[in-house]
Image: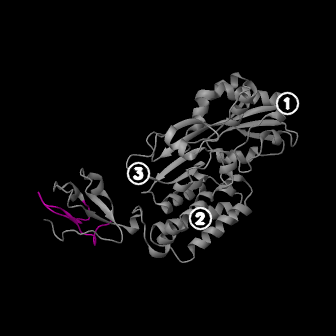
Amino acid sequence: METERIEIFGHGIKGRPSAERWSSREWKELVCLFPEDQSESGTVKYLLEHYLDEIISGMEALKDRLKLNSICALLSKNHEIYEEKFRLSGIQTNLTDDMKGIQKEIFKEGILVHHAETMLALHRNLTDENYVPHKIISVTGDVMEPGIYEIPFGITLEEIITKYAKGVTAGKTVKFVSAGGSMGAVYGADELDTLFTYSSLLKEGTMLESAQIEVCSNDTCIVDWACKRMLINSRKTCGTCVYCREGIYQLFRILQDAAEGKGREGDISLMKEICETLKAGTLCDIGRTAAVPLLTAMNKFGEEFEKHIDRKICQSLSCISYVKFYIDPALCNGCGDCMVCPEHAVRGGENLIHIIDTDICNKCEKCIKVCSRNAVKRYGTVKPVLPSEPV
């Protein structure tokens, strides 16, 4: 079979060559996924805008080579404008505003399911004898030029940051990088030489369906970051597996407590146990990778998790429960804008350095938002030297 020589890979955690999958059984139908909603990275929209003809060509080529009965494109409703192009090509489309729900219906015996980018790679492989595998990724976070880029496989995470995203935001340094969207593994600053390849990234247990690189600087709280990831992933579960449905949400609640100063002894070992259970006891790649961000974060930033839960300290001063606010005397110009405080916790007057009464401050942050001098700051366990009265 001609397809046996094609060296492209899918996006799941197995890293299995697509040609091996094609020859594994008799397929009847191809469903091409364009799985993106408003919260995704934008790479699918980029594919539709720039490479729709090539994707359709790849779908048709695979249909011919595998002698499939039909092909179908599964589109989210916010990509409805592209439906006509598929129809003119004789390809059936299915529009949905619930990509998660409908995917349960298509993973059936005899239905070959592929991501749109795999069909683009197939087209390029068949039409260009010098084809070099590329990946469309989005780079977000603390970088100078976030955006969507086409990168060759085999470059390092550091090269992606410096060459494509033009480096880290001025004045900041990299704390960690997440590769693979909301289910991507965490790589510390000492791991930026990791190659962007299936073999090096998949060994952490992540998927590349959402090839999103998020760069986080040292002012990012890893606990708060992981908490938000688990909340996002809890909304992606289809609900079939109890471990997945309940486990991911419980991880979110434990992390939420940790960020709010309510962490309990044994929380870390409990989270690790739930993470390992998800990997072993769920049926699909989503369930098996949902806890990857948290598990890799705990493995590489374990001390920061312990400080949150055992010592009630947030070293990045991100978690509101662990910080207090003060007005920097060196920056305050006595303008009085911060006295909008609804709790009247800010005291001062014209041409006086203002102060915050931390006993009545409810941390609403209104003073931070209105201060044009950025004089309102946070402190943790060490209180700065401050005047006790407006001066």
Residue 354, given in percent of the width and then of the height, sits at 18, 62
- The Cα atoms of the two marked residues, 3 and 1, are separated by 50 Å
The residue stretch that appears in magenta: 341-362
The mark that comes first in sequence, 3 or 1, is: 1
Report the residue marked by disc 1.
Answer: 2
Q: Amino acid at mark 1?
A: Glu
Q: Is residue 356 left or right of residue 319?
A: left
Callout 3, which amino acid?
A: Lys
Q: Which residue is mark 3?
A: 172
Residue 182 visible to the viewer: yes
Q: Sequence order check: which comes first, mark 3 or mark 2?
A: 3
- How packed mark 1 is, by other alpha carbons closer than 10 Å (few <14, some 14-19, many 20 or more), is few
For the N terminus, the image quarter is top right
Q: Earlier in the sequence, mark 2 or mark 1?
A: 1
Dot 2 alpha-carbon crowd within 10 angstroms: few under 14, some 14 to 19, many 20 or more: few
Residue 344 drawn in magenta: yes
Residue 378: say if magenta: no
